[in-house]
Amino acid sequence: MFKSVCIKINFIKCLVVLLLIFSGKTTAQQQDDSEKGGISYQLKWSERTALSILNQYPNAWQLDGNDKPKWDYKMGFVLSGFEKLYQKTNNKKYLKYIKDYVDEMIDSTGNLKKYDIKEYNIDYLSPGRLLFNLYDLTKDQRYLKITGQLRNQLETQPRTPSGGFWHKQIYPDQMWIDGLYMGEPFYAQFTVKYEKGRSLNDIARQFELAQNNITDKNTGLQYQAWDESKAIAWANKQTGTSPTIWGRGIGWYMMALVETLDYFPKSHPKYKVLVGYLNQVAKNVNEYKSPEGLWYQVADKPQLFGNYVEPSASGMIIYAFAKGADKGYLPSSYKKTAQKSFESFVKEFVKVDKKGEITILNVSSNVGLGGKPFRDGTNDYYLTAKTKENGAIGIGAFLLSAIELNK
């Protein structure tokens, strides 16, 4: 009897050990990693991602493989996630990471290093959003001064004949879909905080121009850009649009809407218009996801040879679905869609090493239009763009979506 009981106990012990081995790390191993400076598997994806970034890129300007500090929208994008995470956790290390980056970019006179207003680069406004909270917390006048300088750029930013902001001085008469994310949330936050909302109509006008001129009439999805003059070689001679519907571009557009709507009073006559735009693009893009719930590099052609699901586009759309539903801009069903797509994102794109650090796989590199050598914006151009691990936009989109979904 006693011998039989011992055999059973030993069998159960062996079974437990085998289950732990085949299921991955044991709790003790995870604890050991944590004690050795690894990242605990027990943390949420959002904090695991943020801690991975802190370990891999001790200075935020190193994100995306940069070798020297620069005032850049990619850093601003990732750090916007750190700001949201700080507001949720009150963990000062996340705030310090933001502040260290911004302070590194300010010279001894209290101005941005290498900032030249004459470039009229709308990308420069996006990291400026970090300055609002930093000023509120510290009352450091440098942050307020630079915020004002970036706002002044919009006063003289060149515009298309219809009133749309040029993407840069070097791109005359061109509105780019990512430019809406770069400019409008900053513009909206500033005008509501410091100008009693006097520029909200102008902000709504930027979205109206994009919706009417950059949106494809057949799919309801957005091209990357529109040249109102139709002069550049990539522009469609009838519509002025660029040739391809880019997945990340749709992500930029949806995020621009959900981030800008944060500052639009519901009583404003353009509030419902912007919510309508968001609902239209959400409905349309939802029709083009993969069976697993992810989105493609060339958004409207899933069957195109060489096309692939892409993490930055997918993460952005997941975030916009989740935030749109949370804020009441979109029906609640989009939250469920976001949750399912998030799980697919983790399976497809997230690699976790033995230290618990996260890497996002297969992120498309930066793409653009025009310039030298000339970028023609064709399907082939997007599909042959190099991919890399931990591209800043991919890891930033995952961070934002994880925070919004409380994952």
Image (cartoon, rainbow, N blue to C red):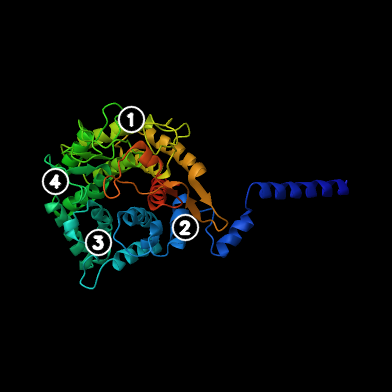
Q: How many discs mark residues in the rendered view?
A: 4
Decide which of tag 1 and tag 4 comes sooner along the chain: 4
**Which residue carries the number 4 mark?**
159
Q: In the structure shown, which secondary structural element does the residue marked by tag 4 occupy?
A: loop
Q: In the structure shown, which secondary structural element does the residue marked by tag 2 occupy?
A: helix
Residue 136: mark in rendering: 3
Q: Badge 2: few (under 14), some or many (20 or more) residues near its Cα, within 10 Å?
A: many
- From this view, report whether residue 82 is shown above or below residue 213: below
Q: Residue at x 51, y 56 (%)?
A: 357
Q: Residue 322: in sight, yes or no?
A: no
Residue at the extreme front of the image, as rendered: 373
* Mark 1 touches mark 4? (CB < 8 Å): no
Decide which of tag 3 and tag 4 comes sooner along the chain: 3
Decide which of tag 1 and tag 2 comes sooner along the chain: 2
Decide which of tag 2 and tag 4 comes sooner along the chain: 2
Residue 52: mark in rendering: 2
| Residue kind at label 1, given as amino acid type | Asn
